[in-house]
Image (spheres, rainbow, N blue to C red):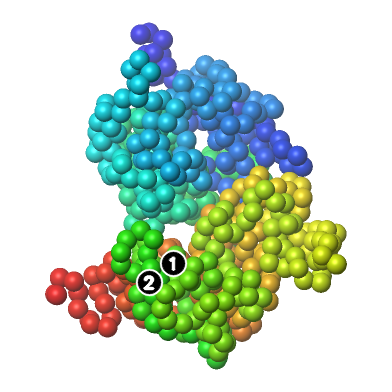
Amino acid sequence: MEQRANAREYPYIIEMLNITKEFPGIKANDDITLQLKRGEIHALLGENGAGKSTLMSVLFGLYQAEKGEIRKNGEKVRINDPNDANDLGIGMVHQHFKLVDVFTVLDNIILGVEPGKMGFLSKKKARQKVLELSKTYGLNVDPDALIEDITVGMQQRTEILKMLYRDNEVLIFDEPTAVLTPQEISELMEIMKGLAKEGKSILFITHKLNEIMEVADRCTVLRKGKYMGTVDIKDTNVQELSRMMVGRDVSLVVDKGPAAPGETVLSVKNLSVKSKLHKRDAVHKVSFDVRRGEIVCIAGIDGNGQTELVQALSGLDKPYEGSIELSGEDVTRKSIRYKNTHGISHIPEDRHKHGLILDYSLGENMVLQRYFEKDFQRGGFIKFDAVRRYSDALIEQYDVRSGQGAATPARSMSGGNQQKAIVARELDRRHDLLIAVQPTRGLDVGAIEYIHSRIVKSRDEGSAVLLVSLELDEVMSMSDRILVMHSGEIVAELDPKETTVEELGLYMAGAKRQNTGDTEDEK
């Protein structure tokens, strides 16, 4: 009892002292010290590739540091693998969830600590505990739903419940809001505050400065693998944090002039796409145009047909009704390759499933849609020197952090740098239409500033841009026109200069439709 009381009096529940972790060609963590107080929300801030996820993977036992030590309650501990971390009460929600798609929510939560008697699985008590935890912390989930059938927000709740089910007292959240809608982000912020009040200690990896200002008590900043300092949130501001993170002042406002729309590039007429999850259409009789020299943004709460619409436009899915025209040509039934070579660039929503081949090198990924061109092949054989030179130029231009340059395996890169590689590839290809879905997801403020400027440059050079974003700030600052989707339909067309975030939210929630002018309550 005395030892436990002393542990409670020790100010830091976790200390990572002088941690150094190296990979081929890069020192991911260079003599970093991080101290987590009991019951605090401690943010870990840094650019893409700054070493945030690596440091947390060392704490969770996924990596072993070459130098330094970890202490819990002042005592040195050895964490060889995630089982050791769980035994010490350390849990982690990864940026890319570690869930089995064909298992239920309940099966994923108890995986590895399955309750049983005499060799037989017994889920009754586990189910009861999961339901009690979900009620206590406001993490509403359906324990019998399959992971592949639920939203990313629900998948994240499942990951959090996995930690709570194991009675973890140190909770690591790695980029927890990167794939969430604004509503889900607000809910997660409240959940994190509730967990901290319950005495949990939270490490929160992010590069979204407004989220840090809202929930964190303290913030440790990393830059290029080095420790920049730890600050109290009450004593700092967004500008100071961004300077610490990227080493310079960053413009948090998109710099763009008025649009000068030209001829129509994309024309969508009465497009309908069937849903894979329910009987009603995912996209129902949608019509709109996008012209050269303008950015049209599709806004909406996740799951209202944006994904299926983009898949139909890009060729990943086929509509059952309606048409898609590209510069006057009907491309409704054309292949993905045809659309790629006839003027469409596509930054996909899911960078792992549709953006990259993770076991290919960075260089090979950079030419996925161009390897057959004469610049990159001769007689059916890839000209690898040409691929490397091209990739190295994009890597430098877009500041893609990769330890081995073009030879770096895509799987080994941070999520933000994987995203930057996709953006570089798609913006560099000749395109009449850029379809950009969540293009800045997982990027730091410096990278966001650069990517926004490149998209605006693409517009100003005469491309048509269709932007799909869940970030309301991005919607309002980047768009020349806003189309709001709800339940698979376009319910409003708005001018960002003449609308407000509150009004946009009403249309997104389905409380208002432009074509009727009525609210749901009035009906």
x%, y% of residue 47? 60, 51
What residue appears at the point 78 percent right and 64 percent down from the top-left corner? 390
Q: Which residue lies furthest to the top in this view?
A: 2
- Looking at the image, is 238 positioned above or below residue 100? below
Query: Label 2 crowding class (10 Å Cα cut-off): few <14, some 14-19, many 20+?
Result: many
Q: In which quarter of the image is the N terminus?
A: top left
What residue appears at the point 40 percent right and 46 percent down from the top-left corner? 147
Given residues 169 and 510, the one toward you in this image is 510
Mark seen at residue 442: none
Q: Is residue 82 left or right of residue 506?
A: right
Residue matched to label 2: 283
x%, y% of residue 449? 58, 64
Tag 2: amino acid: Val
What residue appears at the point 35 percent right and 75 percent down from the top-left corner? 284
Tag 1: amino acid: Glu
Given residues 81 and 480, the one toward you in this image is 81
x%, y% of residue 329? 57, 87
Q: Residue furthest left?
A: 522
Residue at disc 1, secondary structure: helix
Q: Residues under labels 2 and 1: Cα distance?
A: 7 Å
Q: Which residue lies furthest to the bottom in this view?
A: 263
Mark seen at residue 308: 1
Q: Quadrant of residue 503?
A: bottom left
> Do the CB atoms of the residues marked 2 and 1 lie less than 8 Å apart?
yes
Residue at disc 2, secondary structure: strand
Q: In which quarter of the image is residue 222?
A: top right
